[in-house]
Image (cartoon, grey):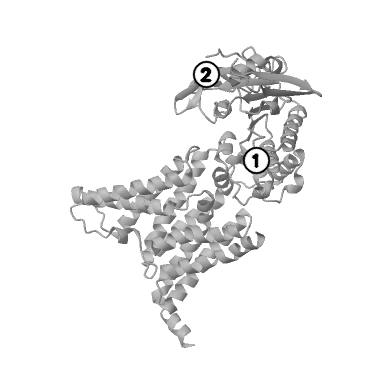
Amino acid sequence: MSWLDDFLAAREIWQVPLAASVIAGALLGFLGVYVVLRRTVFVSAALTQIATVGLVAGLFMEEHVHAEAEHAHHQLAIAMGFAVAGALALGALRSRRLPAEAIVGAAWVAASAAVVLGVSRLVHAAHDLGGMVFGNAVAVPVEELWIIAGVAVLCAVVHVAFAKEIAFVSFDPETARALGVRVWLWDAAFSFTIGLAIPAAARALGALPVFAFLTLPASAALLLRLRFRAAILVAAAFGVVAAAAGYVISWFGETPTGATMVAVAVLFLVPGAFRRVARG
Amino acid sequence: MIPAQPAAAPGQGLGAPAGAAPLVALRGAAIGYGGLALLPGIDLAVAPGDFLAIVGPNGGGKTTLLRTLLGSLPVVSGRREQARPVRIGYVPQRDQVDAIWPLTAGEVVLMGRAHAIGPLRRPGPADRAAAAAALRRVGIEELSGRFYGELSGGQRQRTLIARALAAEPELLAVDEPTNGMDPAAELSTMDVLRDLHGGNGGLAVVMVSHRLDAVANYARALAFVDKEKRLFQVGPLAEMLRPEALSALYGRAVTVREEGGRRYVHPVAGGGAP
């Protein structure tokens, strides 16, 4: 099979992006169950925009106090720092009086305005801000593979160690608070993982796959009426399969990689949707 | 403002055995959010064995009072006293618990053990036994494996009560437990609360409700709360169920009658402010 031989012979090209995509699929898949159930599916848009604010601030500092912000690692560190801070702020702002999506939407629009205002104050306005925040799943530097792998391990450790606390404060913060559970602490732990995962994955794969992996595998798993823990495992598995299959299909079909991954992830919604229709 | 009436002599609860030290108390407290006092001058103590119902109109500050009593909200001024750590079981309003979560009734109840288990530890056999016992006490043991979101309103309410019981509480706080229930489910839920209170030698129950009918046959003491009228009154049930007291709370004539051993509380049709 010459096509398979050709594919394997080219592994130097695809092995790093494929590995990064698979790890991001698993990571965002399991985090997505919380994101969907907490009704904050636009959190990736808000946090990447907050990360962009950080990069604009970095460029501003570079122009005015000659602080280093050109290097990719510095940019990613700034993006992750701002995204973690933004996620912690969003978690702290959870309110009895406002739905979660209103707070996420407000954060996105405020950050978007801040980016426009910040860019207008930069002397060198031609910076490719999008390229600093969003990568491309076709070509992922090996350093970014290690970063996303490290982030995935850290997030998994936090979520395994504190699973019952994070689940309780996400499901019913009012009761958790009344029982003496430190809701702010476990909300912060969750926000910390989201704030790390989203910019790391966005830098490696781009905006579209990140949003998709954070919503579609989780939605597909939840439509299957699985129990909570099973839904987390299945969502992670869906994320892995969507990333791997999407990458391979895009390789052979010469289609845009990120969009192909998303298209595969959409297919996972079909069984659950049929099941819903069949049940009336 | 109608003057605050202490429930009992300071240091005592309502209907509690004489001399019983209160579990929690508010002393000269103002309740509210974000430093803004909605209702000042509250003196209220809850002791073992109390069954206190906090009643008043929607938006009157009942839940704010309950949360302040439990310590979830800080007092704006005055003091909240709690002499020792008190195990609290809390039953939130049913519509605050998001039914899209794919958690079984058993898993929801097990959450009541979270604080007892502590971080970095998994629920053990004793925790599972406590959760199973709590489900059994509210009569829904067979629903343990069913998704919470697929239960009826009454079954969900029992699940939330069971979760509160799984914490092995000394004080059970219940927020609007009969909201949106049909009369049969309402009676059934109130019977569960009465049995828990009566059958547990000292379990204190504090319940928020805007349904006077629902609490008039169960509570031993009532607190009236209406922040719009700057009203807070508390006292034994017989004293508080007087028509004139109820009329002051609701701003219209209210009648109380007894029939077949049950009390019925009704606003008078066409009855204006007294």
Q: Which residue is identified by label 1?
A: B113
Residue depicted at 65% across the width and 63% down the height: A278
Relative to A151, is A4 above or below? below
- In the image, B230 versus B5, the foreground residue is B230
Q: Quadrant of residue B56?
A: top right
For marks 2 and 1, give the one nearer the viewer: 2
Residue B179 at x, y percent in the picture? 64, 35
Q: Are marks 2 and 1 in contact (CB under 8 Å)?
A: no
Residue A120 at x, y percent in the picture? 22, 50
Residue depicted at 64% across the width and 14% down the height: B244
Disc 2 and disc 1: Cα gap in Å?
38 Å
Q: How many marks?
A: 2
- In the image, A24 versus A249, the foreground residue is A249
Given the image, what chain letter belongs to the residue carrying mark 2? B
- State the mark number for residue B230: 2
Relative to A126, is A188 above or below? above
- In the image, B206 versus A16, the foreground residue is B206
The residue most toward the front is: B270
- Please report whichever mark, 2 or 1, sits nearer to the chain's N-terminal start: 1
The residue most toward the right is: B260
Residue A30 at x, y percent in the picture? 53, 57
Given the image, what chain letter belongs to the residue carrying mark 1? B
What amino acid is labelled 1 in the image? Arg
Residue A220 seen by the camera: yes
Circle 1 — which element?
A: loop
Circle 2 — which element?
A: loop
Residue B192 at x, y percent in the picture? 74, 34
Relative to A252, is B107 above or below? above
The residue most toward the bottom is: A2
What amino acid is labelled 2 in the image? Arg
